[in-house]
Image: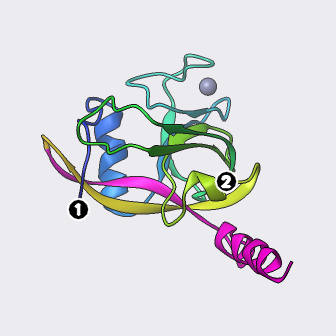
Amino acid sequence: MQRRPRRVRGRGHDEFWAFCEAGELRMQRCKDCGHVQWPPVPDACERCELAVLEWERLSGTGQIVSWCTFERSYYPDLPVPWDTILVELEEGPLFISNPDGFTNEEVRINMPVRVTFVDCEDETGRFRLPAFEPVGPTGPKNQKGAQDETASTA
Ligand SMILES: [Zn+2]
């Protein structure tokens, strides 16, 4: 169980966390223009302003388009260095998250990832936080292993 800073709650957000609890990554898609909202909105589509939103289950896959490691502590509950990644989800939204099972030293641009759910708790209780793991056998660990092998035989 990982301790985390307090998550955002409220209309839209509460529904998002409830779906995460069920192991589902869902976002609101506008039934009119198709836009996927992130972060959640309380009422209407942020693009066309119509209130015809539907919680769609996403594929949970995407690619890492940027990353950042915090060397300075901003939250007592997050030990540094603290890795964050920016995932472009298959359905379009950009999602700030954390690597699960790898570190930012192993990240490469456009690395394919898929969602996982990490058991966490904040001051309001326990919850499941979306994070991302590498997809497929060409993950960063294998690549790093290959590099190390090359180095040791050189
Ligand atoms: Zn819309």
Count the marks.
2
User: Measured from the top left, where is residue 72 in percent x and y?
Assistant: 40, 31
The quarter of the image holding the C terminus is bottom right
User: Measured from the top left, where is residue 89 in percent x and y?
Assistant: 64, 47
Q: Is residue 8 magenta?
A: no
Q: Earlier in the sequence, mark 1 or mark 2?
A: 1
Region rendered in magenta: 125-154
Viewer-proximal residue among 35 and 127: 127
Reading the image, the residue beneath label 1 is: 1
Give the SS element for disc 1.
loop
* Residue that appears at 64% across and 30% down: 32
Cα distance in 3D space between marks 1 and 2: 25 Å
Specify the amino acid type for callout 2.
Gly
Left or right placement of residue 53 versus residue 63 in this view: left
Residue 62 is marked as 2
* Residue that appears at 64% across and 60% down: 113
Left or right placement of residue 18 versus residue 89 in this view: left
Viewer-proximal residue among 99 and 60: 99
Left or right placement of residue 145 versus residue 23 in this view: right
Give the quadrant of residue 14: top left
